[in-house]
Amino acid sequence: MVDSKEIELTPIKRIRLYEEVESQLMSLVKNGRIQPGEKFPSESELVEQLNVSRAVLREAFRILEAKGLVYSIQGRGRYLRFVEEPKSVNSEYLALELEKTSIIEIYEVRLGLEPIAAKLAAQRWKTEDIECMEIIVSKLETEEQHKQFDYPFHLAIAKTSGNYVLRKLIVMQLNLVYGVSNEKVNFILNSRKIEDYVNEHKKILEAIKKRDGDIASKLMEEHLSKSLYLLMKDRNDF
């Protein structure tokens, strides 16, 4: 008989129910089922699917909100917040040192991709897409909010385009800009009035709502061109 003192066992950790629910909710994020700025399923849907009480579900969401991963809007629901997390960016891109020249190249690519996404979004949006973008735009009133919600706005347009390849290409560029090069994002923000940024986003959204793809595309091109101009001017002045 084996001596019990010679056997090493790891104590079983007791997992609370809300922790399991939290893990299930985050699996939706990790699997790409829910993107930054997108809404989680309703409480009634989640309670039914997870077979838990509303109290347990709300406790799980409370933990996620405390971690800064989720935010809620009264009467609307809970949304996934964009969290700056460089680990989410492919290691190949993390290796890039984003000097002024490379950030300019990224904006040149965005300038080629995102006007197309805006045009397609104007043609293909559904009610929930517009609701999502309206919520995001309503959060862009201050410089700090802009840093946090600009990414979800551009991501929402890419998603609404309905083109999977285009969406992935845009996400790649957004991750490079917002996940790694915070200094450059701050430079662009500090070089212009926040009111101008807010108005530009509102105009783009309005054109998409009107299903005017040509105007939405033009406005997106102008919006990104202004940032590209500032980056190029800064490089030349350096």
Image (cartoon, grey):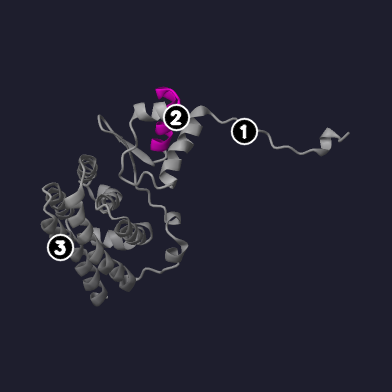
| Total numbered circles | 3
User: Does residue 30 appear to the left or right of 106 in the view shown?
Assistant: right
* Alpha carbons under labels 1 and 2: distance apart: 21 Å
Which quadrant: the N terminus?
top right
* Alpha carbons under labels 3 and 1: distance apart: 55 Å
For the residue labelled by badge 2, is the local secondary structure a helix, a strand or a loop?
helix
Which quadrant: the C terminus?
bottom left
- Depth order, front residue of 51/191: 51
For the residue labelled by badge 1, is the local secondary structure a helix, a strand or a loop?
loop
* Alpha carbons under labels 3 and 2: distance apart: 45 Å
Name the outermost residue toward the right. 1
The magenta segment is 50-66
Amino acid on which disc 2 is placed: Leu
User: Percent x, y for residue 84?
Assistant: 38, 52
User: Percent x, y for residue 102?
Assistant: 33, 71
User: Percent x, y for residue 112?
Assistant: 23, 66
Amino acid on which disc 3 is placed: Glu
Which residue appears at 42% of the width and 40% of the height?
67
Q: Residue 87: say if magenta.
A: no
Give the mark toward the camera: 3 or 2: 2
Which circle's residue, 3 or 1, is located before the other in the chain?
Answer: 1
Q: Are dots 3 and 2 in contact, CB under 8 Å? A: no
| Residue 123 can be seen, yes or no | yes
Which residue appears at 40% of the width and 33% of the height?
61
Secondary structure character of the magenta stretch overall: helix
Please name the residue that numbered disc 2 is placed on.
Answer: 50
Please name the residue that numbered disc 1 is placed on.
Answer: 13
Please name the residue that numbered disc 3 is placed on.
Answer: 222
User: Percent x, y for residue 66?
Assistant: 40, 36
Amino acid on which disc 1 is placed: Lys
